[in-house]
Amino acid sequence: MEVIERLIYLYHKFHQLKVSNEEYACMKAINFLNQDIRGLTSASQLEQLNKRYWYICQDFTEYKYTHQPNRFPDLMMCLPEIRYIAGKMVNVPLEQLPLLFKVVLHSCKTSVGKE
């Protein structure tokens, strides 16, 4: 249940921020280039790549959304939620994923309709 609640929270946060495709792609890259994963042999190279995408995302948001100075920090505050959800989704049996996403989508559609 906690995963569903956090997915719904994240959906609302993305909806509120109106996350662009470019920002989403940068966040995916930053999340993927997580140097905290155990067993990495070249963590420093991964950290450099990760930083590069942070700077790219920051430059992009500051250039495109000049009227939203807190946009980049707000986006980056979503990363812990994304990492948590991703970590929990690994443990969800594959046959249950469609049902999980169906519940989340239904909940998000209902709440967006109320706005």
Image (cartoon, grey):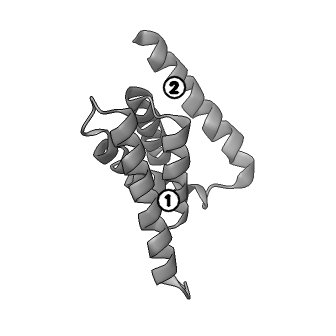
The answer to whether residue 65 is seen in the rendering is yes
Q: Is residue 91 left or right of residue 85?
A: right
Q: Residue at x 51, y 25 (%)?
A: 107
| Real-space Cα separation, disc 1 to disc 2, in angstroms | 25 Å
Quadrant in the rendering for residue 6: top left
Q: For mark 1, does the 10 Å Cα neighbourhood hold few (<14), some (14 to 19), or many (20 or more) residues?
A: some
In this view of the protein, which residue sits in the foreground, 93 or 76? 76
Which is more foreground, mark 1 or mark 2?
Answer: 1
Q: Residue at x 47, y 59 (%)?
A: 53
Q: Residue at x 45, y 74 (%)?
A: 47
Q: Position of residue 91 (x, y in %)?
A: 60, 61
Quadrant in the rendering for residue 102: top right
Q: Is residue 83 left or right of residue 16?
A: right
Q: Position of residue 67 (x, y in %)?
A: 27, 29
Residue assigned mark 1: 31
Residue assigned mark 2: 107
Label drawn at residue 84: none
Q: Secondary structure at mark 2?
A: helix
Residue type marked 1: Asn
First of labels 1, 2 by sequence position: 1
Q: Looking at the picture, does residue 42 appear above or below residue 73?
A: below
Residue type marked 2: Ser
